[in-house]
Image: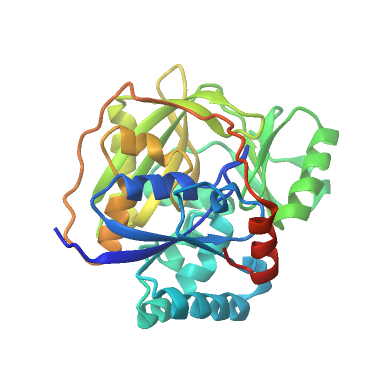
Amino acid sequence: MNDKKYTIAITGLNNIDSPGPGVPVIRGIKDSDLNARIIGLAYENLEPGIYMPGLVDKTYLMPFPSTGSEAFLERLAYIHEKENIDIIIPNFDSELYLFIKYSEQLLNMGIHTFLPSLYQFEERHKDNLSEYAKKYNITVPANKAVVNSKDLADLPKPITYPYYIKGKFYEAFKVNNYNQGVFYFNKLSAKWGLPVIVQQSIKGTEVNVIALGDGEGNTMAAVAMRKQYITDKGKAWGGITINDERLLEITHHIIKETKWKGAMELEMIKTEEGDYYLIEINPRIPAWVYLAVGAGQNIPEMLCRLALGEKVEPKETYECGKMFIRYSWDLIGDISDFEKIIVFGEL
């Protein structure tokens, strides 16, 4: 076993009601054989992961991805100069474009990533899902990308009420009438930009898979779960690992056909008739990744080892009936820490 100490930078420390994956990713790494120093990369000064004792060794504030590539690269270069980063694991959809686009530049600096290509990332966008489904022979609900709220008055068949309206990167709301649709369209487009996606609601059980592809068509890890408790934002607040061979078959098929590189989450609806509808592909580690770790597949560790070019054996089994439940926990800190992150941008 390699005893070298690696410096691993991780984003997504916002462990709130719509949690980022950063905290469970760090927990997975700390549970592994990797000898790691953890650098937190935060976009806001109140992300709880900054202040959680024993979680990160140091945190730096990052400029929002919307600030542009220059500020992003400048800040990363400054952090790398001080910390000598070996691996970065980005955990937000909205930042992935920059990390993927500049992955070669980061590698030249000595920073490893393990991310999908720009083509893979763009191809599975919500507004491309129908084409994606045709190309890879997957079933998806009827959907339409909308750029004007007036289009909601004349949606193509078979889209009918109720449907879901989804933001380009995050958030989805169930819509039962035109006025609701316009309200949520305005909310989502203001927050995440255009297009906004309308997707037919499908009756059934939501089932999800977290998976890891090696970039050559092989599935290195895959764990299926069923959501047991869902928040008003549609986030899993409780879930249980399940044995669903068809769900895992679909996952292996997608990774094989697309040669997906990196982590992904498949969100699917299983109907009473046993049909599976793909509703979304998230091109990153999801926030419930620690359930996979608990079930026997430490995906954060495997992703780090793949990023470093190490040989990793695929995990083909996991424990079914493993359950996770999220909970709130009040952290007591000192205002001086908060002031440091605001004034200096690091803690």
Q: Nearer the viewer, residue 32 or 12?
A: 32
Coordinates of residue 345 in the picture (x, y in percent): 63, 68
The quarter of the picture where the N terminus appears is bottom left
Coordinates of residue 337 in the picture (x, y in percent): 63, 57
Against 238, residue 267 (above or below) is: below
Against 181, residue 197 (above or below) is: below
The quarter of the picture where the C terminus appears is bottom right
Q: Nearer the viewer, residue 172 or 332?
A: 332
Q: Residue 144 vs residue 26: left or right? A: right
Q: Is residue 215 visible?
A: no
Coordinates of residue 68 in the picture (x, y in percent): 64, 75
In the rendered picture of this protein, how many numbered marks are placed on residues?
Answer: 0
Q: Residue 3 vs residue 262: left or right? A: left
Q: Residue furthest left?
A: 1
Q: Residue 207 vs residue 93: left or right? A: left
The quarter of the picture where residue 113 lies is bottom left
Coordinates of residue 27 in the picture (x, y in percent): 39, 45
Against 65, residue 52 (above or below) is: above
Against 113, residue 323 (above or below) is: above
Residue at 43% across / 41% down in the picture?
266
Q: Nearer the viewer, residue 184 or 28?
A: 28
The quarter of the picture where residue 158 lies is top right
